[in-house]
């Protein structure tokens, strides 16, 4: 949820995100939500990986949290990530994924 929060903050443009932003992004990524997002954020706050404020959106990833994300991403095998990306061909354009149509849906 830490990395998803970071992505949500980046999508918002200012680094801040809400629980609703996380829920929307998890849904878009087709990932199951944790049973209690607020409890997870509280745990991340206790570890000082996120912080909150009164103004909404109210959460952001701290530099320590960002370092944790980088540490976790360092464990990702680039070959496996490349394979996963080739399974969904397309391009990023206009801040959205533009899929490639399969030949079945192309012109005759």
Image (cartoon, helix red, strand yellow):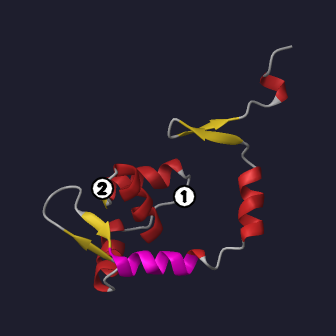
User: Where residue 92 appears, x then y in whole percent?
Assistant: 60, 42
User: Where residue 84 appears, x then y in whole percent?
Assistant: 73, 57
Residue pictured at 64% horizontal, 79% vertical? 75
Residue 59 shows in this picture:
yes
Residue 31 - label: 1
Would residue 88 be counted in the magenta stretch?
no
Q: Secondary structure at mark 1?
A: loop
Q: Is residue 1 visible?
A: no
Q: Residue at x 41, y 67 (%)?
A: 35
- Viewer-nearest of discs 2 and 1: 2
Side (left or right) of 99 relative to 108? left
Residue at the spot of label 2: 14
Mark 1 is surrounded, within 10 Å at the Cα level, by few (under 14), some (14 to 19) or many (20 or more) other residues, namely: few
- Label 2 vs 1, first from the N-terminus: 2
At 40% from the left and 51% from the top, the residue drawn is: 11
Mark 2 element type: loop
Establish if 10 lies above or below 40. above
Distance between mark 2 and mark 1 Cα atoms: 24 Å
Does 3 sit above or below residue 70? Answer: above
Looking at the rendering, the stretch of residues picked out in magenta corresponds to 62-72
> Which quarter of the rendered picture does the C terminus lie within?
top right
**Marks 2 & 1, CB-CB < 8 Å contact:** no
Q: Is residue 69 magenta?
A: yes
Name, please, the residue furthest toward the right. Answer: 108
């Amino acid at each position: 949820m830490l990395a998803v929060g970071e992505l949500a903050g980046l999508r918002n443009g200012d680094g801040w995100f809400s629980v609703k932003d996380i829920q929307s992004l998890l849904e878009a990524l087709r990932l199951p939500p944790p049973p209690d997002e607020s409890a997870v954020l509280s745990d991340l706050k206790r570890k000082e990986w996120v912080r909150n404020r009164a103004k909404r959106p109210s959460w952001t990833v701290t530099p320590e949290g960002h370092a944790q994300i980088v540490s976790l991403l360092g464990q990702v095998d680039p070959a496996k990530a490349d394979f996963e990306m080739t399974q969904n061909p397309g391009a990023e354009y206009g801040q959205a994924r533009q899929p490639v149509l399969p030949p079945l849906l192309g012109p005759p």
